[in-house]
Amino acid sequence: MTFRPLHDRILVRRIESDARTKGGIIIPDTAKEKPQEGEIIATGPGIRSEDGRLHALDVKPGDRILFGKWGGTEIKLDGEDLLILKESDVLGIVEQTAEHKKAA
């Protein structure tokens, strides 16, 4: 199934954090918080201004983003839990430095 968000909405897949602390303690699923980081799967075309011009979004598919803990609407597509957010709910784009890209 394909899904295309409308206007300034984006479709996001949450990125799960590591299940261990830096000290090596394993965190059970019941104690984990929902991740606030995700990868954009699809975006809408943008939002129209009052004069009718289309303003493109600042984010694009493939971007890793941070978003608010309670933002968005949770949906399930093809058995996968996803999130629909407005672009205004995005706090920022996570950009990897050259050092982190080599380690990955």
Image (cartoon, grey):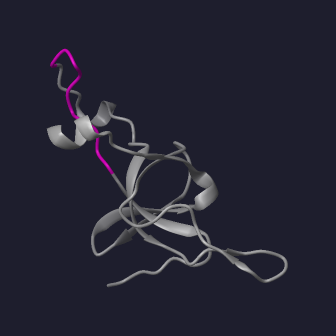
| Residue drawn where x is 15% and y is 19% of the image | 24
2 on left or right of 89: left
Quarter of the image with the N terminus in it: bottom left
Furthest toward the top, the residue is 23
Q: Residue 40: x, y in percent?
A: 40, 62
Depicted 69 relative to depicted 58: above or below: above
Quarter of the image with the C terminus in it: top left
Furthest toward the right, the residue is 51
Query: Who is closer to the viewer here, 60 or 101?
Result: 101
Kindly report the secondary structure that dominates the magenta region of the rendered protein.
Answer: loop
Is residue 16 located in the magenta-colored stretch of the structure? Answer: yes
| Residue drawn where x is 38% and y is 36% of the image | 33
- The answer to whether one can see residue 104 in this image is no
Q: Residue 85: x, y in percent?
A: 54, 61
67 on left or right of 34: right
- Quadrant housing residue 55: bottom right
- The answer to whether one can see residue 91 in this image is yes
| Residue drawn where x is 39% and y is 57% of the image | 63
Q: Residue 91: x, y in percent?
A: 56, 45
Is residue 23 located in the magenta-colored stretch of the structure? Answer: yes
- Quadrant housing residue 7: bottom right
| Residue drawn where x is 22% and y is 19% of the image | 22
Count all numbered tags in the image, as a single digit. Answer: 0
Query: Who is closer to the viewer here, 74 or 91?
Result: 91
Furthest toward the front, the residue is 98
53 on left or right of 69: right
- Magenta residues (range): 15-24
Q: Residue 65: x, y in percent?
A: 44, 50
